[in-house]
Amino acid sequence: MSKLTATAPCTAHAAIVEKTGEVVPQPLLAQRVAWLTGLARDLTARLVAARWTAADLDALASGVGLDGRALPSKGWMAMRRLGWGMAPEPGVYVCDRVLRCTQEQAARMLRLALHRRRLAAAIVATWSANPRARTNNEWEALRALLPDGVSAAEIRNRTRQIRAYRDEHDAFPADLTDLEEPPKVAAQIVLAAADRQLITLERTGPRGARLRVRLPLTEAPASRRGWAWHVLPLTLPPTVPADAMLCTPTLRAKHGRVRVDLPFQTLIEVAPATGHTIGCGFDWGVNTLLTGVTGRLTGSRVISDGRPLTYDAGGVSAKLHRLRAEREHLAAKHRHLERLLVRITPTDRRYAKLSTAYEVIGVEHERVCARIRNLNKALAWSAARWAVDQAVATRATVIYLEDLATLETRGRRGSANARLSGQVRGQVVEAIRHLAAKHTIAVVTVPARGTSKYCPRCGNGTSVLKHCPAPDRLTEQGWTWANCPACGLSCDRDWAAAERIVARGLLGQHATRTHRATGTRTILKVVDGNVARARPARKPTRAARRARRTRTDLRPRPAARDRSKNRATPKRPARTTTNVKNAATTSMTSSRVPDRRTVPAPPPTRGGQRPAGHAPQPGRHTPSRTGHVRNSHHRTGFHHAQATPVLTLTEHRVSPSQATPVRVP
Ligand SMILES: [Zn+2]
């Protein structure tokens, strides 16, 4: 058994002063909480700024206190062992527990800074002549200096930061303290470091909790009497199970309300690292955000059910792209106005107009940033929910993903998903880990190298795929479609990559490693194998039987033709005896996605677009009695994202004895 931690956002609407029974309404309560968080922020900011030197960061990084003993993992205790503290302003009384909370927050920020510092030092040490395109050797040298699990996006952002510094100062930064100002401190109080002298929390029922906390009665309390115990009744959101264990919250005041970020822990079973037979593999798509397949390990062979699972967020990523352009535009305007304002004095008649515009644009910029953040988060959780639902529906016990650390920037510059990649992918992985843990599904990352380069059907990871723009343009150079010259496989590039990911995972599962501190699982060894596509045997329909009997083509397809429109559209060839030999094989075509397409897949049919904000018609998404889903797409929560519906496999469909491998010539 293990513990899964999540945070429930709660709001305290009022409080009671414990001693007097006085009811504190929300505005006053928010003010008192704001005084407390203000005191904490000032102390933390002063403490962080005072220790923002190379020598102090070295001392913290050494992990040894003044007394020669190793620093404890608890942040505030480590700070005390180092003798780092900050006294409040003279005349202000702040109890020791509040000081502890500020030390805890400062320690967390400084430890995060140590991580950034290590990254920056490694990048400077292995600075390449062209940091935009490092060679393989340069990447290896850099990776050797970096801690495990640093993503390519993190490296790219730090590299940009260092390059900007170098362009400006004509030298490398000596330390992180040159590169960055001391980090900004949020107005919040991390109560996790406090004890019963500052806070108590108890559950009052399945949906309620009572938080007792000491709050200041004035902005700068002069003595102990300036503080009083407040009782805050909290209503827990329905996502908190009745048996969950509540942990110490973080308090902050925002827009006149008291926000209580309440972490809670639930007991979950730990998914085993090995012994999986059914697994889902997901590829970070070029054509889609996520493309997945389900694989089954039979003996030493991986068989997939031949159903690609796609989560296409093209519309949302286009929106994100527009918002990002808007953000850059506003930032440029803001900087321009700032430069103009510096040059004139407040007595200038243009000053009032310019300073108003400056403020308005600043607010607008922050709102656009918040919109991007929220959209990224919503998209990541929606995609993760969909991926885990697919795994649950196919009874997979493991989800395989590409390791973001080994995933270099792929894709054409400017393609929708290349723009989406870095920001959303990390969030998707975190969300999948969290959601999968609830269903006891293991999440394992596999090496990303070569997943889309080699054929999943033949050669055990040696036969190189050819990439082209579309299935009917196999001779052209392209990106989205994969074609194997050796075995004739022709399918979506991401689908082929997802098959190779699931094969790498299922075949290499004995080499799964679990990180001791974080519990994340990875496979570093590359074990490749072919993936067969098997579809369950289906009884032929009456039309198919008739087609076979009369030796006619059930679904005639136009032959691939020259795309240039320099002649009249040819008539569909009449059914003659010469095609009959051909027809015998094509009449076996299933309505599911075939192995080899001669034309691009048709766009999914939609019953017209709903206007934004309109609820879908009831029952539209529920499978009818025949198990047929009328709306062909999964509900993603976005109007412009489309995903494969989650269909629970019946016994008939998962039974391997009924599945017949499809032979690929
Ligand atoms: Zn092949």
Image (spheres, helix red, strand yellow):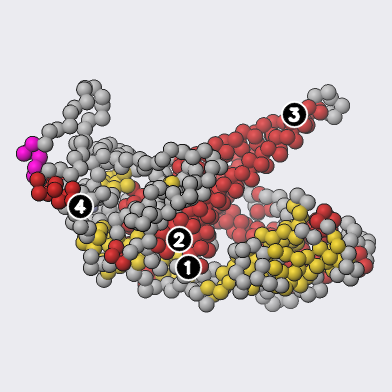
Which residue type does callout 3 highlight?
Leu
Badge 3 density bin: few <14, some 14–19, many ≥20, Cα 10 Å: some
Amino acid, disc 2: Val
Which residue occupies 29% across, 56% down?
Answer: 306
In this view of the protein, which residue sits in the foreground, 11 or 532? Answer: 11
Q: Is residue 387 left or right of residue 232?
A: left
- Taking the image as shown, residue 576 lies to the left or right of residue 186, namely left
Q: Is mark 4 within 8 Å of ligand 1?
A: no
Q: Are marks 2 and 1 in contact (CB under 8 Å)?
A: yes
Q: Using the numbered discs, state the Cα–Cα distance from disc 2 to disc 3 in whole angstroms.
A: 52 Å
Residue 148 appears in the rendering: no
Q: Report which residue position mark 1 lands on.
A: 439
Residue for badge 3: 340
Q: Identify the residue at image location x=63%, y=40%.
A: 368
Q: First in sequence: mark 4 or mark 1?
A: 1
Q: Look at the numbered disc 3 and give the secondary structure of its residue.
A: helix
Image height of 615 relative to 74, above or below: above
* Mark 1 Cα-neighbour bin, 10 Å: few <14, some 14–19, many ≥20: some
| Rendered location of residue 397, percent (x, y) | 40, 68
Marks 4/1: CA distance?
38 Å
Q: Nearer the viewer, residue 240 or 488?
A: 240
Does the magenta segment cover residue 579? yes
Residue matched to label 4 = 541
Q: Residue at 38% across / 66% down in the picture?
A: 395
Asked if labels 1 and 4 touch by Cβ distance under 8 angstroms, the answer is no
Q: Which residues are magenta?
A: 576-581
Q: Which residue is mark 2?
A: 388
Give the CA distance from mark 2 to mark 1: 8 Å
Q: Amino acid at mark 1?
A: His
Mark 3 to mark 1 CA distance (whole Å): 57 Å
Mark 4 residue element: loop
